[in-house]
Image (spheres, grey):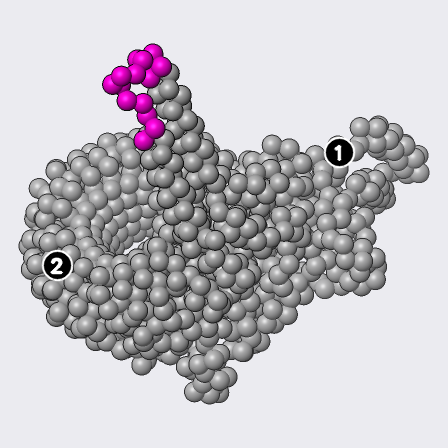
Amino acid sequence: MNNVKKSKHLKSLTFFIINKLTTKLPSMHGTNKTQAKMRYGHTTSLVFFFFFFLHLVFSQLSLNQTNTMNQLYGLLPNSTAQFSPPSPWNVTKDPNPCPWKGVTCTSNNSAITNLSLPFSSISSSDFLVVLCQIDTLEAVDLSNNHLSSIPDGFMTGCGKITGLKLLNISRNKLSGPLPTFNGFAKLESLDLSHNSLVGSINLQLDGLVALKSLNLGFNQFNGPVPTKLGKSMVLEQLGLSANQFEGTIPEAIANYANLTAIDLSVNYISGSIPGRFRELLKLQLLILSSNNLTGGIPQFLSTIQNLGRFAANQNSFSGVIPVGITKYLKNLDLSYNNLHGSIPGDLLSQSNLQSVDLSDNSLSGSIPANLSSTSVRLRLGNNQLNGTIPSSSFGSLQTLTYLELDNNSFSGSIPPELSLCKNLALLNLANNHLTGVLPVQLGVLSKLQELKLQANNLYGEIPIQITQLQTLQKLNISWNSLNGSIPSSISSLQALTNLDLRCNNLSGSISALIGNLNSLIELQLGNNKLSGTIPLMPLTLQIALNLSSNLFEGPIPGTISKLIGLEVLDLSNNKFSGQIPDFLVKMTGLTQLVLSNNLLSGVIPKFLPFVTVDVRGNSGLINTTNSNSPSLSPKQRKTMDVGVFLFAAGGASGFLLVTIIVVLISRQGNGGLDIMAFVDMLMGFERFLIQFYSVKGHWITDNSIHKSKLNLSKAMEAVSKPVNMMLKSEFCTYYKAVMPCGMSYCIKKLNWSCKAFHLLNPERFVQELMVLGKLSNSNIMIPLAYTLTARSAYVVYENPQHGTLFDLLHASCDNVLKWEERYSIAVGVARGLAFLHGCSTSTGPIILLHLSTKSILMESLSKPLIADFDLSKLINPSKTMGTISVVAGSLGYIPPEYAYTMRVTPSGNVYSFGIVMLELLTGRPAVSEGTELAKWALTQTQLIHHDKWKEILDCRLLSDASRGVHDQMLSVLRIALGCIALSPDERPSAESLLYLLLDVTQQFSL
């Protein structure tokens, strides 16, 4: 007997007993009142007791639902399995399922209504079939699991549940075509987004008569945009983004008059916006971004009073912007189109307007004088706008946070009235024709984080008031005509990370106080008239120190040696004299050293292979490079990292001191001190310390091959030799260690002293490392063993034999990677990234701090390995200088939103991977001649027709390539452009990205 029948029988029994009890209540006529009261009270107690008994009966689930829940418990992943989250249920501790996590029952606990188990690692399709036995379900949420299919038993079983209103199986691994939904009479919300469902959508959803919300985004559906979405036409929300729908937008969508949200972004949809959309009077959100839409922006948008957001960016819309379309809008994005003409006078003045993005079009004319007082973001960059920046409009813009007018033809001065925009965080007026002096009033913008004024015609001195901006992180006033000295008070900008003053007429000396800029990672002072002594620079400098084309003279100052994290040093076109100091060789962070056109003399030191050195224009320099010379000079050999092991040398230090004295005395007695013998002795002692400590190494892997081949003592000895250095970043250095058997390994050294590491103790590091060491994916670098010291940690990996992807792509023009290899690399990185984002570690998925071609190491010419993924669990960006510092070594890969959010995200990783794909496609580096690859690619694809997009691909690949290769490259280019979408919400997930790339091979043959 099921629960419903039991309930009916109990109700009948209840009414029968109550009737019998109440009919026996004594009459007050002719009866003793005391006896009557006693009998009445007794009877009433029986009634109350019976009701209490019924409550207990009704408060228990039926045996059927309890057994079903026990079955579901048995189908959950074993909580002892690796990387599976602990089971949310405990049958032994609590046999009643209603209190279980994710389970909702009715108020009297008689039936289960909701089942919500996201992030539970569920992969069994049987789980779906069994849950359909709970016929009282109203909502099921199984998002973010590992389900690969929807079985027929689920469709038939749950289709019969009359009360089911919500079904969410998003962010799983569903594949195959969309099943047909028969039954599901009351289903209102269906979310199957972020899966790998394929095929076209015809009548599979037409039977859902109550459907109000449908999200099928981020799948691989193709064919025309579906219109059969429920015969009752009650649909309110339609999400079909990031698929492969093509053709035009159907007029029939307008038949769903209750629609409030439509998202068709990131597809292959062409044609224009249907005129019938004017009938959708309830529409609040319309997103059409990243398609092939053409035609004009429709005027009827001004008639839809509920429409709050309209995004049509990254299409091919043309014509002028119609008047009145922002009458009711809050957010408008028409960027990256082919719009021309002037900005309508009323467009920016509407009272509800908050965000407008018209950047990267061909708009001309001036900015309208009236601007909305509710404006938060205004982006008009990369157009052909001219005239002056209206000064009268900004006094009322108290909420304006981002103002971008760069790459236009504005003239006149910078309006001092901009200082009235108290909430400005970004002010970008770069690449215009602005003149005059820097307004001192800008110094009151206490929330300003970025000030970009480069490439204008500004003159005068840098006002001291600018140095009052305590939140300022980026200041760029390069390529102007500023004069005077650099204010010493600039040292008060403690949040400053990037300072660019190059190509001006600045003179005088650099204040010694500049060393107090403790967050600075880039300093550009080239092409000025600076002179005097070069002071101690901020020790945090990493990206670049550029002092080129100034009036500096004398020897290269030794203070530069303290910049151990610096990657680029440019001292060219000065009057530096003397020898190239040895300390430059020891700056292991350097990747580029420019000393050209000075007065340097002497022998050119031997730099590490990965350092690019330019010494042209120094007639006194002598190049004595000899491949047969020893790999290490005495001075280099003395720089070995002895200090790393001093924690073990409490007693050993005494031994060292005695040994030194003995050596000194013995050598002096034989005619003098033999330095080389002393250095050899010292090296021997260092090896002793290494071997002494190496016994404390710990294995992560259980692989017997590695345990037999890897000698940790030899590995640690290799780390002590700079010649073995392979790669260096801000937080770690990679070394190559060759074992006696010939097998090589890669050792990563992490410097504990870096304040980025927020570990409270080594145990936390070990815990994370042991978890990460158990991961299994062929496209990530899995740690094998580790060793801890007081100052550093050393992690051992298998050694990738082909260096970095950056080296393979850009280091040589002779050996060009074939397209087949590049495509395999893209798929491999996507596979590794999807795996990391899908990991269920104790602290959630693994999000990379940075991803670039320099952080991708190559096991073979077609097999990439993502490195440094373990740093994401060890480094807290907020403990350093913010996210920008963490990803500073990845200039050109940083997604635009990081400048504002200051946190790493999965969509940010996808953006960085989009840049990697563009490098694979174009052969260009992430930054070339000062231009970021993302900006270049977006501009090129907007300027030329789709049929000619192959013009931006690497020409070295196209000459002998087949039509199939051409088509495949263009498909990958389209995917890459989707990854670098300006809005994080418009980028695919890593998992969807992998399936998009894999699908390319199914569409085209190589």
Residue 790 seen in the current view: yes
Mark 1 is on which residue type? Leu
Please tell me whether residue 736 belongs to the stretch shown in magenta: no
Instruction: State which mark lies toward you, 2 or 1.
Output: 2
Which residues are the magenta region?
23-37
Numbered badge on residue 281: 2
Please tell me whether residue 33 belongs to the stretch shown in magenta: yes
Q: CA distance from mark 2 to mark 1?
A: 75 Å
Spot occupied by residue 392 in the image (x, y as percentages of width and height):
8, 42
The quadrant where residue 381 appears = bottom left
View extreme (front): residue: 30
**Measuring 43% from the left and 40% from the top, which residue is drawn there?**
58
**Measuring 67% from the left and 36% from the top, which residue is drawn there?**
763
Taking depth in this image into account, of 471 and 828 the one nearest to the observer is 828
Residue 602 seen in the current view: no
**Measuring 18% from the left and 73% from the top, which residue is drawn there?**
251
Task: Report the magenta stretch's main SS.
Answer: loop
Neighbourhood count class around disc 2 (C-alpha, 10 Å): few under 14, some 14–19, many 20 upward = some
Judged from the image, the secondary structure of the residue bearing numbered disc 2 is loop
Numbered badge on residue 480: none
- Judged left or right of residue 653, residue 925 is left
Spot occupied by residue 175 in the image (x, y as percentages of width and height):
47, 69
The quadrant where residue 122 appears = bottom right
Spot occupied by residue 888 in the image (x, y as percentages of width and height):
47, 48
Judged from the image, the secondary structure of the residue bearing numbered disc 1 is helix
**69 shown above or below 213:** above
For mark 1, what is the residue? 646
In primary-sequence order, the first of circles 2 and 1 is 2
**604 shown above or below 808:** above
The quadrant where residue 340 appears = bottom left
Spot occupied by residue 111 in the image (x, y as percentages of width and height):
43, 46
Neighbourhood count class around disc 1 (C-alpha, 10 Å): few under 14, some 14–19, many 20 upward = some
